[in-house]
Image (spheres, helix red, strand yellow):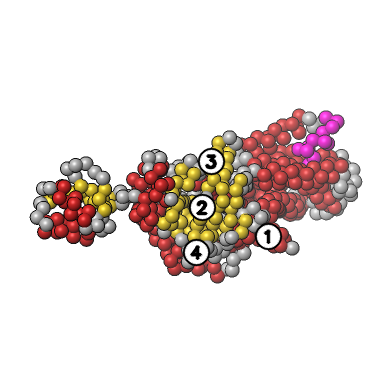
Amino acid sequence: MKPCIIETHGLSYSFGKRQVLQNLELRVPQGAIFGFLGPNGAGKSTTIRILLGLLPVPEGQVLVHGQDLKYNRLDILHRTGALIEMPSLYRHLSGHDNLEMHRRMVRAPKSRISEVLQIVGLAADAHRKTKEYSLGMSQRLGIALALLADPELLILDEPTNGLDPSGIREVRELIIRLNQAYGKTIFLSSHLLSEIEKCATELAIIDKGETLYQGSLQQLYEGAFQSNVLHLETSNNAIAHKLLSDHQYQLLPHSDDVLAVQVQDKQQVATLNRFLVVNGLEVYRLSTHTQNLEELFLNITNREAEKHIHSSKL
Amino acid sequence: MSSLIYYRSSLSAEALKLKNTFSLWLAILAPCALVSMYVLAFWSKGEHLLREGANPWYAFAMQIFGIYTILLMPIFIALLTSLTNGIEHKSNGWKHLYSLPLPKSSIYAAKATTVIGLVLLSNLIFVCAYLAGGLFLSVVRPELGFEQMVGLEAVYVTVVKMLLATFMIIAIQFWLSMRWSSFALSMGVGIVAIVTVMVAMRWEHIHYYPFAYPFVSIRQFAAGKEVIRVFTQEVVLSLGGGLLVFILGYFDIARKRIS
Protein backbone atom coordinates (compact mmCIF):
# COMPACT_ATOMS: atom_id res chain seq x y z
CA MET A 1 0.00 0.00 0.00
CA LYS A 2 1.44 3.34 -1.03
CA PRO A 3 1.57 6.06 1.58
CA CYS A 4 -1.34 8.48 1.59
CA ILE A 5 -0.75 12.09 0.78
CA ILE A 6 -4.13 13.17 2.08
CA GLU A 7 -5.90 11.38 4.90
CA THR A 8 -8.99 12.53 6.67
CA HIS A 9 -10.33 10.84 9.75
CA GLY A 10 -13.94 11.39 10.68
CA LEU A 11 -14.04 14.80 9.09
CA SER A 12 -17.31 16.56 9.80
CA TYR A 13 -18.25 20.11 9.14
CA SER A 14 -21.34 22.21 9.47
CA PHE A 15 -22.33 25.69 8.52
CA GLY A 16 -24.46 26.63 11.48
CA LYS A 17 -27.03 23.85 11.79
CA ARG A 18 -26.58 22.55 8.27
CA GLN A 19 -24.33 19.52 8.23
CA VAL A 20 -22.10 19.73 5.17
CA LEU A 21 -19.66 16.90 5.78
CA GLN A 22 -20.28 13.78 7.79
CA ASN A 23 -17.48 11.52 8.85
CA LEU A 24 -15.59 11.91 5.65
CA GLU A 25 -12.78 9.37 5.30
CA LEU A 26 -10.57 10.18 2.37
CA ARG A 27 -7.40 8.32 1.44
CA VAL A 28 -5.49 9.83 -1.42
CA PRO A 29 -2.52 7.62 -2.33
CA GLN A 30 0.72 9.23 -3.41
CA GLY A 31 1.17 9.49 -7.15
CA ALA A 32 -2.49 9.10 -8.01
CA ILE A 33 -4.87 11.23 -9.97
CA PHE A 34 -7.62 11.21 -7.43
CA GLY A 35 -11.04 12.06 -8.74
CA PHE A 36 -13.28 13.64 -6.17
CA LEU A 37 -16.71 13.28 -7.54
CA GLY A 38 -20.06 14.48 -6.41
CA PRO A 39 -23.06 16.49 -7.55
CA ASN A 40 -23.19 20.19 -6.85
CA GLY A 41 -23.65 20.89 -3.18
CA ALA A 42 -22.23 17.53 -2.11
CA GLY A 43 -19.52 19.15 -0.03
CA LYS A 44 -16.63 19.04 -2.50
CA SER A 45 -15.73 22.70 -2.24
CA THR A 46 -16.03 22.65 1.53
CA THR A 47 -13.65 19.70 1.68
CA ILE A 48 -11.16 21.50 -0.53
CA ARG A 49 -11.39 24.65 1.56
CA ILE A 50 -10.69 22.62 4.64
CA LEU A 51 -7.72 20.92 2.96
CA LEU A 52 -6.28 24.32 2.13
CA GLY A 53 -6.81 25.69 5.60
CA LEU A 54 -9.37 28.25 4.48
CA LEU A 55 -11.92 26.78 6.84
CA PRO A 56 -11.08 25.52 10.32
CA VAL A 57 -11.15 21.79 11.05
CA PRO A 58 -13.80 21.53 13.73
CA GLU A 59 -14.16 17.77 14.08
CA GLY A 60 -11.95 14.96 12.98
CA GLN A 61 -8.40 14.99 11.78
CA VAL A 62 -6.86 15.99 8.48
CA LEU A 63 -3.40 14.79 7.56
CA VAL A 64 -1.73 16.18 4.48
CA HIS A 65 1.78 14.97 3.64
CA GLY A 66 1.48 13.07 6.90
CA GLN A 67 1.23 16.24 8.95
CA ASP A 68 -1.72 17.44 10.95
CA LEU A 69 -3.33 20.37 9.19
CA LYS A 70 -4.28 22.02 12.45
CA TYR A 71 -0.70 22.59 13.50
CA ASN A 72 1.31 22.67 10.27
CA ARG A 73 -0.77 24.80 7.94
CA LEU A 74 2.14 26.71 6.42
CA ASP A 75 4.36 23.65 6.00
CA ILE A 76 1.57 21.81 4.25
CA LEU A 77 0.70 24.73 2.01
CA HIS A 78 4.36 24.98 1.03
CA ARG A 79 4.13 21.56 -0.52
CA THR A 80 0.69 22.00 -2.03
CA GLY A 81 -0.44 23.91 -5.09
CA ALA A 82 -4.07 24.81 -5.56
CA LEU A 83 -6.45 26.05 -8.18
CA ILE A 84 -9.82 26.85 -6.74
CA GLU A 85 -12.61 27.15 -9.30
CA MET A 86 -11.63 30.12 -11.41
CA PRO A 87 -7.97 31.00 -11.11
CA SER A 88 -7.43 34.29 -9.34
CA LEU A 89 -5.61 36.18 -12.03
CA TYR A 90 -4.91 39.84 -11.82
CA ARG A 91 -6.40 40.90 -15.10
CA HIS A 92 -4.43 44.12 -15.37
CA LEU A 93 -1.13 42.21 -15.34
CA SER A 94 0.46 40.00 -17.97
CA GLY A 95 0.70 36.26 -17.52
CA HIS A 96 4.36 36.65 -16.71
CA ASP A 97 3.71 39.32 -14.08
CA ASN A 98 1.02 37.19 -12.49
CA LEU A 99 3.56 34.43 -12.16
CA GLU A 100 6.24 36.81 -10.91
CA MET A 101 3.94 38.16 -8.23
CA HIS A 102 3.05 34.70 -7.14
CA ARG A 103 6.68 33.66 -7.27
CA ARG A 104 7.56 36.40 -4.82
CA MET A 105 4.96 35.13 -2.41
CA VAL A 106 6.02 31.50 -2.54
CA ARG A 107 9.72 32.40 -2.83
CA ALA A 108 10.43 30.17 -5.82
CA PRO A 109 13.54 30.75 -7.91
CA LYS A 110 13.19 33.08 -10.89
CA SER A 111 14.03 30.37 -13.41
CA ARG A 112 10.90 28.52 -12.35
CA ILE A 113 8.67 30.99 -14.21
CA SER A 114 9.88 29.97 -17.66
CA GLU A 115 9.76 26.33 -16.60
CA VAL A 116 6.10 26.43 -15.63
CA LEU A 117 5.22 28.49 -18.69
CA GLN A 118 6.80 25.74 -20.75
CA ILE A 119 4.91 23.02 -18.91
CA VAL A 120 1.51 24.58 -19.45
CA GLY A 121 2.39 25.73 -22.96
CA LEU A 122 1.95 29.46 -22.45
CA ALA A 123 5.51 30.61 -23.14
CA ALA A 124 4.46 32.47 -26.27
CA ASP A 125 1.66 34.36 -24.56
CA ALA A 126 3.49 35.19 -21.35
CA HIS A 127 3.67 38.92 -21.98
CA ARG A 128 0.08 39.45 -22.98
CA LYS A 129 -2.29 40.84 -20.40
CA THR A 130 -4.37 38.10 -18.88
CA LYS A 131 -7.62 39.87 -19.71
CA GLU A 132 -6.93 38.91 -23.32
CA TYR A 133 -6.57 35.23 -22.42
CA SER A 134 -9.19 32.69 -23.35
CA LEU A 135 -10.78 30.68 -20.56
CA GLY A 136 -8.63 27.67 -21.35
CA MET A 137 -5.46 29.76 -21.24
CA SER A 138 -6.52 31.34 -17.96
CA GLN A 139 -7.11 27.92 -16.54
CA ARG A 140 -3.70 26.75 -17.66
CA LEU A 141 -2.10 29.85 -16.20
CA GLY A 142 -3.93 29.05 -12.98
CA ILE A 143 -2.31 25.63 -13.01
CA ALA A 144 1.06 27.26 -13.76
CA LEU A 145 0.59 29.41 -10.65
CA ALA A 146 -0.12 26.32 -8.61
CA LEU A 147 3.00 24.68 -10.00
CA LEU A 148 5.41 27.51 -9.19
CA ALA A 149 6.53 26.23 -5.85
CA ASP A 150 7.02 22.77 -7.35
CA PRO A 151 4.54 21.14 -4.98
CA GLU A 152 4.12 17.39 -4.64
CA LEU A 153 0.38 17.75 -4.42
CA LEU A 154 -1.94 19.70 -6.67
CA ILE A 155 -5.48 20.40 -5.58
CA LEU A 156 -7.64 21.37 -8.52
CA ASP A 157 -11.23 22.35 -7.92
CA GLU A 158 -13.33 21.92 -11.05
CA PRO A 159 -10.49 22.88 -13.40
CA THR A 160 -12.51 22.25 -16.55
CA ASN A 161 -15.56 24.18 -15.49
CA GLY A 162 -16.89 26.37 -18.24
CA LEU A 163 -14.33 25.34 -20.84
CA ASP A 164 -15.15 24.34 -24.39
CA PRO A 165 -14.31 20.79 -25.53
CA SER A 166 -10.84 21.69 -26.79
CA GLY A 167 -10.10 23.61 -23.59
CA ILE A 168 -11.25 20.64 -21.55
CA ARG A 169 -8.98 18.41 -23.53
CA GLU A 170 -5.97 20.69 -23.11
CA VAL A 171 -6.44 20.80 -19.39
CA ARG A 172 -7.03 17.07 -19.16
CA GLU A 173 -3.90 16.29 -21.12
CA LEU A 174 -1.96 18.68 -18.94
CA ILE A 175 -3.22 16.97 -15.81
CA ILE A 176 -2.25 13.55 -17.08
CA ARG A 177 1.18 14.84 -18.11
CA LEU A 178 1.77 16.44 -14.74
CA ASN A 179 0.98 13.16 -13.11
CA GLN A 180 2.98 10.91 -15.39
CA ALA A 181 5.96 13.06 -16.36
CA TYR A 182 6.34 15.11 -13.21
CA GLY A 183 5.06 12.66 -10.65
CA LYS A 184 2.55 15.02 -9.07
CA THR A 185 -0.27 13.68 -7.02
CA ILE A 186 -3.42 15.36 -8.24
CA PHE A 187 -6.59 15.81 -6.28
CA LEU A 188 -9.20 16.63 -8.85
CA SER A 189 -12.70 17.60 -7.94
CA SER A 190 -15.41 17.55 -10.51
CA HIS A 191 -19.05 16.97 -11.13
CA LEU A 192 -18.18 16.03 -14.70
CA LEU A 193 -18.07 12.28 -14.58
CA SER A 194 -16.74 11.88 -18.06
CA GLU A 195 -13.73 13.95 -17.02
CA ILE A 196 -12.88 11.89 -14.00
CA GLU A 197 -13.45 8.71 -15.97
CA LYS A 198 -10.86 9.79 -18.54
CA CYS A 199 -8.00 10.57 -16.26
CA ALA A 200 -8.47 9.48 -12.67
CA THR A 201 -6.78 6.39 -11.29
CA GLU A 202 -8.56 6.51 -7.95
CA LEU A 203 -11.78 8.10 -7.03
CA ALA A 204 -14.17 8.92 -4.28
CA ILE A 205 -17.80 9.67 -4.81
CA ILE A 206 -19.50 11.78 -2.24
CA ASP A 207 -22.98 13.07 -1.82
CA LYS A 208 -24.54 15.09 0.97
CA GLY A 209 -21.22 15.09 2.78
CA GLU A 210 -20.84 11.32 2.90
CA THR A 211 -18.49 9.02 1.05
CA LEU A 212 -20.47 6.66 -1.15
CA TYR A 213 -17.58 4.95 -2.86
CA GLN A 214 -13.84 5.07 -2.64
CA GLY A 215 -11.29 3.01 -4.52
CA SER A 216 -9.83 2.57 -7.94
CA LEU A 217 -11.80 3.14 -11.09
CA GLN A 218 -11.12 -0.45 -12.11
CA GLN A 219 -12.70 -1.81 -8.97
CA LEU A 220 -15.69 0.39 -9.37
CA TYR A 221 -16.33 -1.12 -12.77
CA GLU A 222 -15.48 -4.67 -11.98
CA GLY A 223 -16.49 -5.29 -8.45
CA ALA A 224 -19.49 -3.29 -7.65
CA PHE A 225 -21.23 -3.11 -10.99
CA GLN A 226 -22.25 -4.83 -14.11
CA SER A 227 -20.11 -2.85 -16.43
CA ASN A 228 -20.49 -4.82 -19.64
CA VAL A 229 -23.57 -6.87 -20.00
CA LEU A 230 -24.37 -8.85 -23.10
CA HIS A 231 -28.01 -9.52 -23.90
CA LEU A 232 -28.70 -12.70 -25.87
CA GLU A 233 -31.64 -14.17 -27.66
CA THR A 234 -31.29 -17.68 -29.04
CA SER A 235 -33.44 -20.46 -30.48
CA ASN A 236 -33.27 -22.23 -27.12
CA ASN A 237 -32.46 -20.12 -24.16
CA ALA A 238 -32.59 -22.95 -21.66
CA ILE A 239 -29.88 -24.91 -23.45
CA ALA A 240 -27.84 -21.75 -23.99
CA HIS A 241 -28.10 -21.00 -20.29
CA LYS A 242 -26.86 -24.45 -19.39
CA LEU A 243 -24.02 -24.35 -21.88
CA LEU A 244 -22.83 -20.94 -20.80
CA SER A 245 -22.95 -21.63 -17.10
CA ASP A 246 -21.10 -24.91 -17.63
CA HIS A 247 -18.34 -22.97 -19.33
CA GLN A 248 -17.77 -20.51 -16.53
CA TYR A 249 -19.61 -17.61 -18.05
CA GLN A 250 -21.12 -15.32 -15.53
CA LEU A 251 -24.85 -15.27 -16.04
CA LEU A 252 -26.94 -12.56 -14.60
CA PRO A 253 -30.53 -12.91 -13.57
CA HIS A 254 -32.81 -11.73 -16.33
CA SER A 255 -36.22 -12.29 -17.98
CA ASP A 256 -37.02 -15.63 -19.65
CA ASP A 257 -36.62 -14.83 -23.31
CA VAL A 258 -33.35 -12.90 -22.89
CA LEU A 259 -30.10 -14.05 -21.35
CA ALA A 260 -27.73 -11.62 -19.71
CA VAL A 261 -24.04 -12.48 -19.55
CA GLN A 262 -21.20 -10.57 -18.02
CA VAL A 263 -18.40 -10.04 -20.55
CA GLN A 264 -15.02 -8.36 -20.35
CA ASP A 265 -14.41 -7.21 -23.91
CA LYS A 266 -15.54 -7.43 -27.53
CA GLN A 267 -13.38 -10.47 -28.20
CA GLN A 268 -15.30 -12.41 -25.65
CA VAL A 269 -18.56 -11.56 -27.37
CA ALA A 270 -17.31 -13.09 -30.60
CA THR A 271 -16.01 -16.15 -28.80
CA LEU A 272 -19.31 -16.63 -27.07
CA ASN A 273 -21.26 -16.28 -30.28
CA ARG A 274 -19.11 -18.86 -32.06
CA PHE A 275 -19.42 -21.18 -29.10
CA LEU A 276 -23.20 -21.07 -29.24
CA VAL A 277 -23.35 -21.49 -33.01
CA VAL A 278 -20.94 -24.45 -32.92
CA ASN A 279 -23.21 -26.07 -30.36
CA GLY A 280 -26.14 -25.92 -32.75
CA LEU A 281 -27.97 -22.94 -31.41
CA GLU A 282 -29.23 -20.06 -33.51
CA VAL A 283 -28.41 -16.63 -32.22
CA TYR A 284 -31.08 -14.03 -32.99
CA ARG A 285 -29.76 -11.12 -31.04
CA LEU A 286 -26.52 -10.03 -29.40
CA SER A 287 -26.47 -6.62 -27.80
CA THR A 288 -24.04 -5.12 -25.37
CA HIS A 289 -25.14 -2.78 -22.74
CA THR A 290 -22.46 -0.64 -21.19
CA GLN A 291 -23.14 1.06 -17.97
CA ASN A 292 -20.80 4.00 -17.88
CA LEU A 293 -19.72 6.02 -14.94
CA GLU A 294 -22.43 8.51 -15.65
CA GLU A 295 -25.10 5.94 -14.96
CA LEU A 296 -23.21 4.47 -12.05
CA PHE A 297 -22.90 7.87 -10.59
CA LEU A 298 -26.55 8.68 -10.91
CA ASN A 299 -27.38 5.30 -9.44
CA ILE A 300 -25.08 5.83 -6.53
CA THR A 301 -26.15 9.32 -5.76
CA ASN A 302 -29.77 8.36 -6.12
CA ARG A 303 -29.12 5.85 -3.36
CA GLU A 304 -30.60 3.01 -5.38
CA ALA A 305 -27.38 1.17 -5.64
CA GLU A 306 -26.06 2.26 -2.31
CA LYS A 307 -26.79 -0.93 -0.45
CA HIS A 308 -25.29 -2.87 -3.28
CA ILE A 309 -21.96 -1.08 -2.98
CA HIS A 310 -21.77 -1.44 0.73
CA SER A 311 -22.39 -5.13 0.59
CA SER A 312 -19.92 -5.68 -2.21
CA LYS A 313 -17.24 -3.66 -0.47
CA LEU A 314 -17.48 -5.81 2.61
CA MET B 1 12.86 36.47 11.67
CA SER B 2 10.89 34.21 9.37
CA SER B 3 7.85 36.44 9.77
CA LEU B 4 9.97 39.26 8.37
CA ILE B 5 10.76 37.15 5.31
CA TYR B 6 7.06 36.35 4.88
CA TYR B 7 6.22 40.02 5.22
CA ARG B 8 8.82 41.03 2.68
CA SER B 9 7.69 38.51 0.11
CA SER B 10 4.05 39.55 0.54
CA LEU B 11 5.01 43.19 0.27
CA SER B 12 7.06 42.80 -2.90
CA ALA B 13 4.14 40.92 -4.45
CA GLU B 14 1.77 43.71 -3.46
CA ALA B 15 4.09 46.26 -5.01
CA LEU B 16 4.07 44.41 -8.31
CA LYS B 17 0.31 44.15 -8.15
CA LEU B 18 0.09 47.95 -8.28
CA LYS B 19 1.60 48.00 -11.75
CA ASN B 20 -0.79 49.53 -14.29
CA THR B 21 -3.47 50.05 -11.64
CA PHE B 22 -5.65 53.06 -11.24
CA SER B 23 -4.81 53.36 -7.54
CA LEU B 24 -1.17 54.06 -8.27
CA TRP B 25 -2.09 56.73 -10.80
CA LEU B 26 -4.63 58.15 -8.40
CA ALA B 27 -1.99 58.53 -5.71
CA ILE B 28 0.22 60.43 -8.14
CA LEU B 29 -2.35 62.45 -10.04
CA ALA B 30 -4.75 63.54 -7.29
CA PRO B 31 -2.31 65.92 -5.52
CA CYS B 32 -0.99 67.18 -8.86
CA ALA B 33 -4.49 67.97 -10.07
CA LEU B 34 -5.34 69.79 -6.87
CA VAL B 35 -2.19 71.90 -6.83
CA SER B 36 -2.39 72.75 -10.50
CA MET B 37 -5.94 74.08 -10.07
CA TYR B 38 -4.66 76.46 -7.43
CA VAL B 39 -1.69 77.41 -9.58
CA LEU B 40 -4.18 78.44 -12.25
CA ALA B 41 -6.21 80.38 -9.69
CA PHE B 42 -3.15 82.27 -8.44
CA TRP B 43 -1.91 82.83 -11.93
CA SER B 44 -5.07 84.53 -13.07
CA LYS B 45 -6.41 86.05 -9.85
CA GLY B 46 -3.43 85.95 -7.51
CA GLU B 47 -3.81 89.56 -6.40
CA HIS B 48 -7.25 88.84 -4.91
CA LEU B 49 -6.08 85.75 -3.05
CA LEU B 50 -3.18 87.43 -1.25
CA ARG B 51 -3.36 89.89 1.58
CA GLU B 52 -0.88 92.77 1.60
CA GLY B 53 2.35 91.80 3.34
CA ALA B 54 1.39 88.16 3.94
CA ASN B 55 3.71 85.30 2.96
CA PRO B 56 2.39 84.15 -0.44
CA TRP B 57 3.67 80.61 0.17
CA TYR B 58 1.42 80.40 3.27
CA ALA B 59 -1.60 81.74 1.44
CA PHE B 60 -0.98 79.29 -1.39
CA ALA B 61 -0.57 76.38 1.06
CA MET B 62 -3.63 77.37 3.07
CA GLN B 63 -5.93 77.38 0.07
CA ILE B 64 -4.79 73.93 -0.92
CA PHE B 65 -4.81 72.48 2.61
CA GLY B 66 -8.41 73.51 3.13
CA ILE B 67 -9.73 71.55 0.16
CA TYR B 68 -7.23 68.75 0.66
CA THR B 69 -8.18 67.94 4.25
CA ILE B 70 -11.92 68.45 4.07
CA LEU B 71 -12.86 67.31 0.60
CA LEU B 72 -10.14 65.40 -1.10
CA MET B 73 -8.62 63.32 1.68
CA PRO B 74 -11.71 61.29 2.73
CA ILE B 75 -12.63 60.48 -0.86
CA PHE B 76 -9.06 59.83 -1.82
CA ILE B 77 -8.46 57.37 1.01
CA ALA B 78 -11.77 55.63 0.37
CA LEU B 79 -10.81 55.23 -3.27
CA LEU B 80 -7.32 54.02 -2.53
CA THR B 81 -8.33 51.38 0.01
CA SER B 82 -11.28 50.08 -1.97
CA LEU B 83 -9.21 49.92 -5.15
CA THR B 84 -6.31 48.16 -3.46
CA ASN B 85 -8.48 45.60 -1.73
CA GLY B 86 -10.91 45.57 -4.63
CA ILE B 87 -8.25 43.85 -6.74
CA GLU B 88 -8.67 40.80 -4.52
CA HIS B 89 -12.45 40.94 -4.27
CA LYS B 90 -12.70 41.22 -8.03
CA SER B 91 -10.43 38.35 -8.96
CA ASN B 92 -11.39 35.80 -6.32
CA GLY B 93 -8.07 36.64 -4.77
CA TRP B 94 -8.63 36.25 -1.05
CA LYS B 95 -9.17 32.52 -1.32
CA HIS B 96 -6.04 32.25 -3.34
CA LEU B 97 -3.94 34.45 -1.07
CA TYR B 98 -4.95 32.60 2.05
CA SER B 99 -4.18 29.26 0.50
CA LEU B 100 -0.58 30.31 -0.05
CA PRO B 101 2.11 29.35 2.42
CA LEU B 102 1.98 32.76 4.06
CA PRO B 103 0.68 33.66 7.49
CA LYS B 104 -2.52 35.69 7.38
CA SER B 105 -0.84 38.39 9.41
CA SER B 106 1.83 39.00 6.80
CA ILE B 107 -0.75 39.26 4.03
CA TYR B 108 -2.71 41.75 6.12
CA ALA B 109 0.36 43.74 7.09
CA ALA B 110 1.60 43.89 3.51
CA LYS B 111 -1.78 45.16 2.27
CA ALA B 112 -1.90 47.78 5.02
CA THR B 113 1.64 48.87 4.24
CA THR B 114 0.76 49.23 0.58
CA VAL B 115 -2.19 51.50 1.33
CA ILE B 116 -0.22 53.58 3.81
CA GLY B 117 2.66 53.72 1.34
CA LEU B 118 0.34 55.05 -1.35
CA VAL B 119 -0.94 57.78 0.94
CA LEU B 120 2.63 58.62 1.88
CA LEU B 121 3.60 58.72 -1.78
CA SER B 122 0.78 61.04 -2.63
CA ASN B 123 1.77 63.36 0.23
CA LEU B 124 5.34 63.47 -1.02
CA ILE B 125 4.09 64.28 -4.48
CA PHE B 126 1.83 66.85 -2.94
CA VAL B 127 4.81 68.66 -1.38
CA CYS B 128 6.77 68.48 -4.62
CA ALA B 129 3.82 69.75 -6.63
CA TYR B 130 3.32 72.53 -4.12
CA LEU B 131 6.98 73.65 -4.39
CA ALA B 132 6.94 73.35 -8.17
CA GLY B 133 3.68 75.27 -8.36
CA GLY B 134 5.05 78.08 -6.19
CA LEU B 135 8.23 78.34 -8.22
CA PHE B 136 6.21 78.36 -11.41
CA LEU B 137 4.15 81.25 -10.02
CA SER B 138 7.32 83.14 -9.12
CA VAL B 139 8.19 83.06 -12.82
CA VAL B 140 4.81 83.84 -14.36
CA ARG B 141 3.62 86.26 -11.66
CA PRO B 142 6.80 87.72 -10.13
CA GLU B 143 4.84 90.55 -8.44
CA LEU B 144 3.10 88.04 -6.11
CA GLY B 145 6.38 87.58 -4.23
CA PHE B 146 6.89 83.84 -4.58
CA GLU B 147 10.65 84.18 -5.15
CA GLN B 148 11.25 84.61 -1.44
CA MET B 149 11.03 81.12 0.02
CA VAL B 150 10.79 81.73 3.72
CA GLY B 151 9.17 79.86 6.57
CA LEU B 152 8.46 76.75 4.58
CA GLU B 153 9.28 74.57 7.61
CA ALA B 154 5.82 75.35 8.95
CA VAL B 155 4.32 73.98 5.72
CA TYR B 156 6.41 70.80 5.90
CA VAL B 157 5.52 70.18 9.53
CA THR B 158 1.85 70.72 8.72
CA VAL B 159 2.00 68.21 5.88
CA VAL B 160 3.55 65.64 8.22
CA LYS B 161 0.85 66.34 10.81
CA MET B 162 -1.82 66.05 8.16
CA LEU B 163 -0.44 62.73 7.00
CA LEU B 164 -0.32 61.31 10.52
CA ALA B 165 -3.78 62.66 11.24
CA THR B 166 -5.20 60.56 8.38
CA PHE B 167 -3.91 57.33 9.92
CA MET B 168 -7.14 56.49 11.67
CA ILE B 169 -9.22 57.20 8.57
CA ILE B 170 -6.95 54.89 6.60
CA ALA B 171 -7.38 52.19 9.24
CA ILE B 172 -11.17 52.44 9.22
CA GLN B 173 -11.46 52.51 5.44
CA PHE B 174 -8.95 49.69 5.12
CA TRP B 175 -10.99 47.46 7.37
CA LEU B 176 -14.25 48.33 5.59
CA SER B 177 -12.83 47.62 2.16
CA MET B 178 -11.25 44.37 3.23
CA ARG B 179 -14.34 43.12 5.02
CA TRP B 180 -16.87 44.03 2.34
CA SER B 181 -16.38 44.05 -1.37
CA SER B 182 -18.76 46.95 -1.92
CA PHE B 183 -17.16 49.98 -3.44
CA ALA B 184 -20.26 52.01 -2.59
CA LEU B 185 -19.78 51.36 1.12
CA SER B 186 -16.31 52.90 1.18
CA MET B 187 -17.41 55.85 -0.89
CA GLY B 188 -20.55 56.31 1.19
CA VAL B 189 -18.54 56.42 4.38
CA GLY B 190 -16.17 58.91 2.74
CA ILE B 191 -19.03 61.19 1.70
CA VAL B 192 -20.69 60.97 5.10
CA ALA B 193 -17.33 61.95 6.59
CA ILE B 194 -17.11 65.03 4.41
CA VAL B 195 -20.64 66.16 5.14
CA THR B 196 -20.38 65.62 8.88
CA VAL B 197 -17.07 67.46 9.10
CA MET B 198 -18.44 70.38 7.11
CA VAL B 199 -21.57 70.60 9.22
CA ALA B 200 -19.89 70.14 12.58
CA MET B 201 -16.81 72.19 11.75
CA ARG B 202 -17.45 74.67 14.53
CA TRP B 203 -18.55 72.15 17.15
CA GLU B 204 -16.35 72.40 20.25
CA HIS B 205 -15.70 68.63 20.39
CA ILE B 206 -14.93 68.22 16.73
CA HIS B 207 -11.32 67.36 17.52
CA TYR B 208 -12.48 64.00 18.89
CA TYR B 209 -14.13 63.01 15.60
CA PRO B 210 -11.75 60.77 13.65
CA PHE B 211 -12.75 62.06 10.23
CA ALA B 212 -12.00 65.62 11.36
CA TYR B 213 -8.44 64.91 12.52
CA PRO B 214 -6.77 66.08 9.28
CA PHE B 215 -8.86 69.22 9.31
CA VAL B 216 -8.06 69.90 12.97
CA SER B 217 -4.38 69.29 12.29
CA ILE B 218 -4.12 72.29 9.95
CA ARG B 219 -6.01 74.68 12.22
CA GLN B 220 -2.87 75.87 13.91
CA PHE B 221 -1.28 76.68 10.58
CA ALA B 222 -4.46 78.35 9.39
CA ALA B 223 -4.58 80.58 12.45
CA GLY B 224 -1.10 81.79 11.58
CA LYS B 225 0.41 80.40 14.78
CA GLU B 226 3.86 78.96 14.89
CA VAL B 227 3.84 75.27 13.93
CA ILE B 228 6.68 73.25 15.43
CA ARG B 229 5.09 70.47 17.39
CA VAL B 230 4.10 67.46 15.31
CA PHE B 231 2.45 65.36 17.99
CA THR B 232 -0.52 67.48 18.90
CA GLN B 233 -3.63 65.94 20.40
CA GLU B 234 -5.38 65.01 17.14
CA VAL B 235 -2.21 63.46 15.73
CA VAL B 236 -1.71 61.31 18.83
CA LEU B 237 -5.38 60.32 18.82
CA SER B 238 -5.19 59.43 15.16
CA LEU B 239 -2.08 57.30 15.59
CA GLY B 240 -3.39 55.53 18.69
CA GLY B 241 -6.89 55.04 17.32
CA GLY B 242 -5.59 53.99 13.93
CA LEU B 243 -3.30 51.38 15.43
CA LEU B 244 -6.17 50.02 17.51
CA VAL B 245 -8.44 49.79 14.46
CA PHE B 246 -5.71 48.08 12.44
CA ILE B 247 -5.19 45.49 15.18
CA LEU B 248 -8.90 44.87 15.82
CA GLY B 249 -9.43 44.79 12.07
CA TYR B 250 -6.86 42.06 11.77
CA PHE B 251 -8.58 39.87 14.36
CA ASP B 252 -11.88 40.37 12.62
CA ILE B 253 -10.45 39.48 9.21
CA ALA B 254 -8.43 36.51 10.48
CA ARG B 255 -11.46 34.96 12.10
CA LYS B 256 -13.63 35.35 9.02
CA ARG B 257 -14.33 32.16 7.12
CA ILE B 258 -13.38 32.27 3.50
CA SER B 259 -16.05 30.87 1.28
- Kindly indicate whether the residue at mark 4 contacts the one at mark 1 (C-beta within 8 angstroms): no
Residue at the image point whose x is 41% and y is 59% from the top: A201
In the figure, A103 relative to A38: above or below?
Answer: below
Mark carried by residue A279: none
Residue type pointed to by label 3: Val
Label 1: chain? Answer: B
Indicate which disc, 2 or 3, sits on the residue closer to the N terminus.
Answer: 3
Which one is in front in this view, the residue at disc 2 or the one at disc 1?
2
Q: Which residue position holds label 4?
A: A2
In the figure, B214 relative to A198: above or below?
Answer: above
Q: Which residue position holds label 1?
A: B6
Residue A225: x %, y % from top left: 34, 50
Label 3: chain? Answer: A
Q: Which residue position holds label 2?
A: A26
Residue A200: x %, y % from top left: 41, 57
Q: State yes or no: residue A229 in magenta.
A: no
Q: In the depicted view, which residue is nearer to us: A303 or A82?
A: A303
Question: Magenta residues?
Answer: B203-215
Indicate which disc, 4 or 2, sits on the residue closer to the N terminus.
Answer: 4
Share a chain, discs 3 and 1? no
- Kindly indicate whether the residue at mark 1 contacts the one at mark 2 (C-beta within 8 angstroms): no
Residue at the image point whose x is 22% and y is 61% from the top: A267
Residue type pointed to by label 4: Lys
Distance Cα–Cα, label 4 vs label 2 = 14 Å
A196 sits left or right of B209 in the view? left
Residue type pointed to by label 2: Leu
10 Å crowding of disc 3: few (<14), some (14-19), many (20+)? many
Residue A15: x %, y % from top left: 58, 39
Residue farthest bottom in this picture:
A111
Q: Tell me which secondary structure the magenta stretch mostly adopts.
A: helix
Q: Which residue position holds label 3?
A: A20
